[in-house]
Image (cartoon, grey):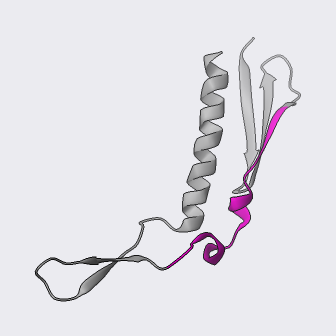
Amino acid sequence: MTKQWVIVANSADARVFETNLVMSRLRFIKEFKHPNGRLKEQNIESDRHGIRSNGSQPGNSSMHSSVSANEHEQLVFAKKLAEYLNKKAAK
């Protein structure tokens, strides 16, 4: 029997279900919670962006990430789900 997983998720909650080709019903497997996915951007970031020197050039430049704090939290949660599915698939 070939198993298929269905994940229903948003940035803070995920549920994993399992089904196979014979049985069309979904069977609940596991629920994940990621409370940081519900936080607003200003509640995730703890302080201002860092400042770095431009070397010999006058002035400084701000260091910011290429992803927002919310996007980072989404990536953290997605990685956690992927790790779970990879372990489950290896069994």
Residue at the location (41% across, 66% down)?
66
Name the foreground residue: 61 vs 24. Answer: 61
Left or right for 68, reference 26 = left
Quadrant in the rendering for residue 64: bottom left
Residue 6, above or below 20: below
Name the foreground residue: 71 vs 63. Answer: 63
Q: Where is residue 30 in the image (x, y as percent from the top left)?
A: 81, 35
Residue at the location (57% across, 73% down)?
46
Name the foreground residue: 55 vs 65. Answer: 55
Number of callouts in the render? Answer: 0
Residue 28, above or below 52: above
Quadrant in the rendering for residue 35: bottom right
Residue that lies at the very extreme toward the top in this rendered image? 1
Residue at the location (78% across, 20% down)?
20
Q: Where is residue 72 in the image (x, y as percent from the top left)?
A: 54, 59
Residue that lies at the very extreme toward the left in this rendered image? 56
Name the foreground residue: 73 vs 59. Answer: 59
Q: Classify the position of the C terminus by image quarter.
A: top right
Residue 31, above or below 40: above
Residue at the location (86% across, 25% down)?
24
Residue 88, above or below 51: above
Left or right for 75, reference 23 = left
Magenta stretch: residue 42 in it?
yes
Quadrant in the rendering for residue 38: bottom right
Q: Classify the position of the N terminus by image quarter.
A: top right
Q: Give the range drawn in magenta.
A: 29-47
Magenta stretch: residue 74 in it?
no
